[in-house]
Amino acid sequence: MAAEREPPPLGDGKPTDFEDLEDGEDLFTSTVSTLESSPSSPEPASLPAEDISANSNGPKPTEVGLDDDREDLFAEATEEVSLDSPEREPILSSEPSPAVTPVTPTTLIAPRIESKSMSAPVIFDRSREEIEEEANGDIFDIEIGVSDPEKVGDGMNAYMAYRVTTKTSLSMFSKSEFSVKRRFSDFLGLHSKLASKYLHVGYIVPPAPEKSIVGMTKVKVGKEDSSSTEFVEKRRAALERYLQRTVKHPTLLQDPDLRQFLESSELPRAVNTQALSGAGILRMVNKAADAVNKMTIKMNESDAWFEEKQQQFENLDQQLRKLHASVEALVCHRKELSANTAAFAKSAAMLGNSEDHTALSRALSQLAEVEEKIDQLHQEQAFADFYMFSELLSDYIRLIAAVKGVFDHRMKCWQKWEDAQITLLKKREAEAKMMVANKPDKIQQAKNEIREEIEEWEAKVQQGERDFEQISKTIRKEVGRFEKERVKDFKTVIIKYLESLVQTQQQVSHFCL
Amino acid sequence: METHAEAGKEGKPSCASVDLQGDSSLQVEISDAVSERDKVKFTVQTKTEFSVVRQHEEFIWLHDAYVENEEYAGLIIPPAPPRPDFEASREKLQKLGEGDSSVTREEFAKMKQELEAEYLAIFKKTVAMHEVFLQRLAAHPTLRRDHNFFVFLEYGQDLSVRGKNRKELLGGFLRNIVKSADEALITGMSGLKEVDDFFEHERTFLLEYHTRIRDACLRADRVMRAHKCLADDYIPISAALSSLGTQEVNQLRTSFLKLAELFERLRKLEGRVASDQDLKLSDMLRYYMRDSQAAKDLLYRRLRALADYENANKALDKARTRNREVRPAESHQQLCCQRFERLSDSAKQELMDFKSRRVSSFRKNLIELAELELKHAKASTLILRNTLVALKGEP
């Protein structure tokens, strides 16, 4: 099996690595064989083995119980579990390493929905990614751009179509550069699919940009004023950031839905993302129910780490909100300043005109010109303020909400586990009672029944426990990754923002000369 | 609230440069000013050791005395200083005092500091304006010899001039309306031709100039205020960033703290830019707006004199034809003619002075403004660069 592998199309410099690491080879072999041997695989039997193995890859060499887990996973057909991905070192340097490094997808995905048929050989190649020791930088060589918003259709059925361009050298995509047209509800559909698959297992799925009925209606109606173009631009930038964040997540990158979103030219319309649909109402009801549940669940937090983190996120959330509000005020005032400067420039020009002393008149008209340029500058600065700083903050506020959601899921998981334990206890008691009572005829049957139930519940308890552990582990890792991402993000944005300020000031000095 | 401001020698007005040519024996300055509950008391001092305490209303009284004096009809009367207005500032301080629970202590202290600085700035400005008024009067060869001026400068006691009550204010309004109606009538009057090109030109120029400068002044004010708002915005941002920074335990900590510091400094710079704009640009525009209004008044008076002269001519002609009361008509006509001539001459002089004054003042202020803006831009570029280097340098 191992011999069949051909070197990955990207891995110009890396084939030697696999030879160095025997572990990797062994694991691969064992992986493939395990998968092939698992009888109760949830995958439809029609899928070739390659497809299944394609979803797996270098598991951590250090994880011993890996194979066992996977057996159980397949036994538990309805649950979807993902393995831990190896710890990744943070990317601290901002220069991207050349696109040679293959990506290390590290999770086993057993999608609930039947997986779309993927091009088998390509997927199989992907499985020989780097092993953990090699992962010195998880630079995903994939660039996503969202551009060219155009209005399609008219009237109330109109919508904006955005072009999503992907440039990548990852082998899992069939081409290295491709683009598709998507509309906003497609993005929402993608998010809801990803969320339903991953959120309850503990992955932090980046939230999609929000719907805005007012904004969209204005665009639909066809008002060609600056506020609607601004709205479209804002939305486009938000969609771009959303996609970029999503593909940065190593697990989500593997997801077939995401790939389909990026690649296929036609996408089934995601109707249940509409605000006023049945699914929308269902979502709202669910949300309300969740909120109530949250209040009633009293969890014994055995792990101080979680408590601390939750507190931390609460604080962070509050402060980000405050900062966000102040930055919005700043943006607003800067826009005002630019408008006022423009008005002043005009009146200064007029004053210059009426002044009959020639030198002064010239000076005044120069002043007017300078002021006008400054006004432009201020406007640009306002945009920069907004797009870089303020949007980042609001993105993070929403991300933190997602993180909190993940924590809540963990609580629910714990709750389930608790419930399973309690039920098991009850069943055991019932069994014990039955032992004591002596009803010969019913005993055997009842005993068997009880026995079965007890077994079932024991299994459930075990499963619940494992789930809980799993989710805790996942959350830990995710939070760690989230933090690193956050640090990186903030830093880059701050640096960009400051640079823009520097630029502005330089221009001002240039003009005043 | 009591504040003292040492106007003194540094109280030289920054808004209008006044060339104190001529007899330097009369030098007036406001050496001290006290702001009490709702009035400001200025201590006016002359070089010849007269020192009195005057209030704003007394300045206004002096100004009106000049305006109503027929002798000075041919001169541009320096515009009266505006009323000291601390209302806006006081309101803001009060609102701040009422307390906003979401504001942290440092933020509160900073905002209070800002408001106090603003209050002080307004105070200094009003002192300067009053001083400029007096100094212009002192510099003018004719105006300085006015008796009322001496009274103002020397009379130790309170001049017991009360502020205009409502009736007088209303009277003032009506007089203005009458004046503008009159002006319209005169110009529309057929047969009244402007004999002098110079004045014709000046008239059109002044009218246009006045409206435009008023416009520019308003807008400059708005720019200044928006800039100030912007600078104030940095306060909560800086505070939020520093609290974020203290919370963080990782590398973001230092970044945030540095950023908070940066914004603090930027704020001060922006505030200074705003106040420079205020002083150099807005104040100057405002002063010349009022000055051009005074010039317009002068022209109006001259026009009025011209109209009178024409009327007297017509009356004389009529009297001559009727051969009755020729003498009084003649003398009246003589008077009118003389008055008109006199006004025209002095008006010409005054208007030329006005122009040169204006040009030099604009030039000085605009140059200073550009230099200051440049300085501030350089300073902020510098601190931004430093912070950038520091941020990039960290892992």
Image (cartoon, rainbow, N blue to C red):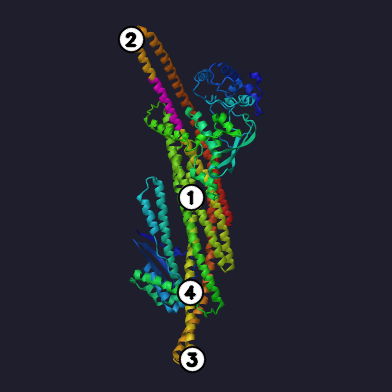
**Label 1 amino acid?**
Cys
Where A184 sits versus B145, above or below? above
Along the polypeptide, which appears first: circle 2 or circle 1?
Answer: 1
The percent coordinates of residue B392 (x first, y second) are: 55, 41
Pointers 4 and 1 in contact (CB under 8 A)? no
Vertical side of A322 occupied by A138: above or below: above
**Extent of the magenta region:** A404-422
Disc 2 versus disc 3: distance between alpha carbons?
A: 148 Å
Q: Are marks 4 and 2 on the same chain?
A: no
According to the image, label 1 marks what residue? A332
Secondary structure beneath dot 2 equals: helix
Q: Nearer the viewer, residue B97 or A337?
A: A337
Q: Is residue B102 magenta?
A: no
Q: How far is mark 1 from mark 3, CA to CA?
A: 75 Å
Amino acid carrying label 4: it is Ala
The chain letter for the residue carrying disc 4 is B
Same chain for labels 4 and 1? Say yes or no: no
Mark closer to the chain start, 3 or 4: 4
Q: Is residue A408 magenta?
A: yes
Q: Check residue A436 in the rendering and tell me which mark sits there, or answer none.
A: 2
Q: Return the chain for callout 1.
A: A
How far separated are the C-alphas under marks 3 and 4? Answer: 31 Å
The residue carrying mark 4 is: B184
> Residue A449's x, y, as percent?
40, 13
Query: Could you tell me which quadrant the C terminus of chain B lies in?
Result: top right
Q: Nearer the viewer, mark 4 or mark 1?
A: 4
Identify the residue position indicated by label 3 in the image: B321
Crowd rating for badge 3 (residues with CA inside 10 Å; few <14, some 14–19, many 20+): few
**Distance from Cα at disc 4 to Cα at disc 2:** 119 Å
Tell me the residue at 34%/61% (across/down).
B37
